[in-house]
Amino acid sequence: MINKNINTSYNNVIDALKCVCISHGMVNNVSSGDIDTVDISANSVYPLVHIVPTTVTAGVHNITFTFNVLAMDLVKTDRSNEQQVLSDTLHILIDVIAQYKHGQMLNVQQNTGIYGQADDKDYNLEPFNERFDNLVSGWNCTLNLTVPSTYFACMNFTPDNLPIDCSKFINVPVEDTPIVFPNDEYIVPPE
């Protein structure tokens, strides 16, 4: 049974990812949400990291959260600093991945994986540049973070937090010959 003292919720995973990003010495701002919610205005403090949740895979013993993580910075209108921006933002994302693979901040070396453990694989990082109110460049990475979890069939879902009696689901007789409809049979609504 899973240790209920270990919080492996979405909030915990994304808060830990935000913490890792903002702890990087080059990052000044971290946000999360849909890609349309990233603050790319001239008022935003750069470099920034934006985290976009994409999918969650619920396995028998773990949950894998998939995020697109974008690191970006301002590029001058003449693009004279674009190479430096790409170099710096690439460095940021590689450091974030390294923290999840080998870092002490997340207790990865003890294999607790409470805040998420990165897949043991190579990561592809893709450069981008966008023009909005200003010109930004950076890198995008798909990051898979896995946390321990276990499926529970019965939990306290009652409004008063009363425990649910799961014993009524255990040892229920199973039909010897259940009725199964053939594949070619259709259910026709009444006219």
Image (cartoon, helix red, strand yellow):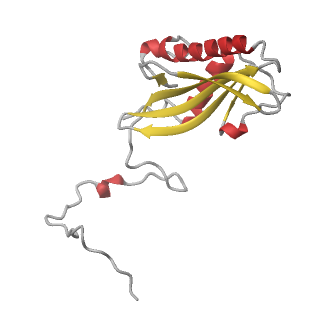
Which residue extends farthest left?
Answer: 176
Quarter the N terminus occupies: top left
Instruction: Reply above or below: 158 against 18.
Output: below
Q: Quadrant of residue 89?
A: top right
Residue 29 as seen in the image, left or right of residue 111 = right
Instruction: Reply above or below: 1 against 173.
Output: above
Q: Can you give x and y, in whole percent of width and height, for residue 176 in the image?
A: 13, 64
Q: Is residue 161 visible?
A: yes
Q: Nearer the viewer, residue 149 or 4?
A: 149
Residue 108 as seen in the image, left or right of residue 185 = right
Q: Can you give x and y, in whole percent of width and height, for residue 135 in the image?
A: 78, 26
Instruction: Reply above or below: 117 against 54.
Output: above
Q: Residue at x 68, y 19 (%)?
A: 22
Q: Quadrant of residue 72?
A: top right
Q: Residue at x 40, y 89 (%)?
A: 191
Q: Nearer the viewer, residue 22 or 189?
A: 189
Which residue extends farthest right?
Answer: 43
Q: Can you give x and y, in whole percent of width and height, for residue 85 in the image?
A: 71, 14
